[in-house]
Amino acid sequence: MKRLALTSDKIFGFTYILLFTILMAIALLHRGLFFAPEKVTASTIVVAGALITGIIVTFYRPLRKHYRVPWFLWLMFGYTAYAWLTTLWAANAEYAVQGALIDTAAVGLAAFVPLLTRTWRTWLLSIIAFFGPALYLFAMGAALKYYHYTNAIQTGFMDSVFQYHNTFGAFSLAAALIGALLAVRTSNVYLRAWYLLNGALSIVGVVVSYSRWVWILTAVMIVLSFVSLVSIKRTRDGFYALVFTVLPALAASPFALTAMRHASKKEFGVVLVIALVGAVIGTLVLLGVSKIKKKWQEVVIPSLFTVFVLVVAVVLVHKEASKFSSVSKRIGSITLSSWSMRQRFWFYGAAMHMWEHNPIFGAGAGAWNAKFQAYQQFPYWSTMTHSVVMSQLVSFGLIGLILWLGFLAFAFRSTGKIVRNRSEDSLLSLTAILALLAILIHSVFDFDMNFATVVFVVFVLVAVAATPSLLPVYETSSAARSIEGNLTKKAWWLLLPGVASLGLVYVGGTLGVSEIQLQAANGITNTDAKIAKLQSAQRYAPYTVQPHLQLAELYYNNYLQSRALSDQEDAWQETQWASRRGIWDPSVLETTGVIAYNLGHVSEAYHWTQRSYQDGKLTTKYSETFLGVALWSGVGEASKNPTDAKSVFQSVVNTYQEVQANENRLQHLPKEVQQEWQLTTDAPMTVYMATAEYALGNFQQSLNALKSLPKANQNPNTTSLTQMVRLLDKANMNHQPTINLVSQLPNRTPQMLNEFEALASIHNG
């Protein structure tokens, strides 16, 4: 029996499209960081729970009479089930559950797609096509209105849209391909102009993403798209659609680069005008081609339009050629030995090292985020493996990679059959698979798909490409009524995505308001008013880290000025919360540890400063802070538990030796690394190590280390500590000279006096 689908005016298609649209809108509101793997929010659970209904609908028995679950979808279900299974042995349950929820939600979204009519699928692709230019417009508007960056590309705003500028470029490319191919498919004049405009703005987004690899990938995908259109006998329309997607974008790109660099509203307006004019001309050409009857007119007339646009594009590009000088230099810098490529090879090596410890089953969902510090043996750390293949191996092992590659293989196989049939579904499937291919190629070398919005789009594209549309209403109307009747009886299943949409509207709205409050706080100079504004941002988005970090910085600065204990305690609460949410910034972790130590939370101080040292091994500041905190925590522990104190002192000595090894290793790393990372075993570190040796009873080693210190360039406290250790040894561990010495220290505190006395009394019995 032929498969059927609901008519397009039913609630099913509408609620699905509404849900998907809101998901994409929220991604824009929160700069693509929504559902980032380090954030477990109530909204994630709501979305996953609602989209599981897609799987339920797929298995609903009355529907199964008319609907056969595709093989790729079965493998998607298996992949999701295995993701949940890996949470049993994952290193971090929070990351593992988050990853499994995201995969479940994405598969739930994909499971609905085979039940959609061709009309709703076209709408679905249209939303994804709009995703590229919408991101570009959002980034431009924010750069112009809120941030006033002198160079929005280099200062990182384009990176923050997807947290990675290359991924922004790849998604813009996918959106451009969808726009161009949908322009070929539609016969509606206004829709065709809209698709061409989307495509042109998406190509502009590719240019301003400043991604060398995506620029090369764009040329490859445009050629591949044209060849694919030739294979399904859509050569003429396909050629003109691609031409009028690319040429206006190239003409507008110099102005876009200027707008991004100098926050120029005028240049931004020129970009929109050029893209719009190109879309109109392209629509007229495609319309004219379809009306032409004579062969010579079919060639000459469109060619004249094309040459006209080409000449205009060349003139504009030539006039603004200087804007492209940095682009050409950037393309020319692509080599396997470039700094960017060396970083990626480091990531790949660390990922392979992690995979070797769990080759079959993997280390569990979210493994890289939980364990990457232990495996990265290089200075430039990242919370991404920069490869979706590496990410699959690390998290799910060979089993997960086989399932992941399996559903992609079945999807490509099914898509090939649909395209070869040259039915009405052929161009729709071809559009989805080319957009999917652009994202996948990028992800293999540069992105591990660790954002839920990316996974959602990828899984939906797989489903659109690999399943032919169900027939709208076949002549056996009783079968159609059977499907609609059974779905109507379980209408609450179909309404769940709508309910989830309401939750997402609320969550997305509060995130957006929080972002506005944060921006407003940046312009406030009054401390109390700024704190109130940041607290307001925190209330609107209690799960996000940024308000906590900004409040912590403000409280801590107040404490440094006023020495008010309440400010220090407030800063401690905020930094501790942020640090526990998976922040990898060593400076945040160090601040958390220092505040903890000042408040007397010695074990917490040791933990956070050790984390800051692990994440910033090639930075003197973090190494020095950890050694100091470790030393004094051991001193404090000595009177209560000498055995534990001894192990802490030994860790100080071992860490000092590790810092020396890192300093030597740094000398053999590329110059770019040496310029970025400055590490020296300075005088304070040496004194901390010598003091630890003294506390362990290794007096001679301690004195030898102290004698090696230069006389100059020592701060007063370091000099005093050095003198104290020497005096203690000469006085046969008599701690009275310590008290006299500490009384002479600048900026001495009762805490410092207690620490020095405790150290002096370690060997006094």
Image: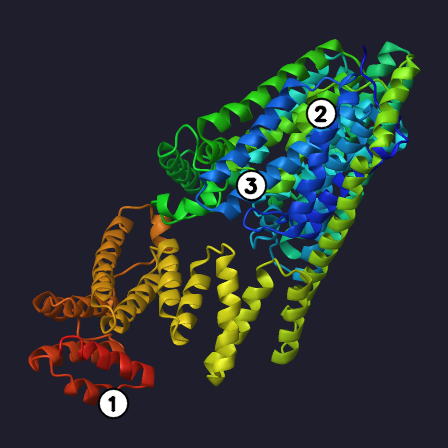
Look at mark 1 in the image and give the residue it sits on.
Answer: 743
Between 514 and 105, the one lying in front of the other is: 105
Left or right for 330, reference 535: left
Between 257 and 179, the one lying in front of the other is: 179
As drawn, 522 above or below 415? below
- Dot 3 surroundings within 10 Å: few (below 14), some, or many (20 or more)? many
At mark 2, the secondary structure is: helix
Residue at position x 22%, y 61% in the image = 647
Look at mark 3 in the image and give the residue it sits on.
Answer: 99
- Dot 2 amino acid type: Phe
Q: CA distance from mark 1 to mark 3?
A: 56 Å
Q: CA distance from mark 3 to mark 2?
A: 24 Å
Q: Earlier in the sequence, mark 1 or mark 2?
A: 2
Circle on res. 59: 2
Q: CA distance from mark 1 to mark 2?
A: 78 Å
- Dot 3 amino acid type: Gly
**Residue 677 image offset from top left, x and y in percent:** 36, 55
**Residue 3 image offset from top left, x and y in percent:** 80, 16
**Residue 317 image offset from top left, x and y in percent:** 67, 39
Q: Nearer the viewer, mark 3 or mark 2?
A: 2
At mark 1, the secondary structure is: loop
Residue at position x 45%, y 26% in the image = 398
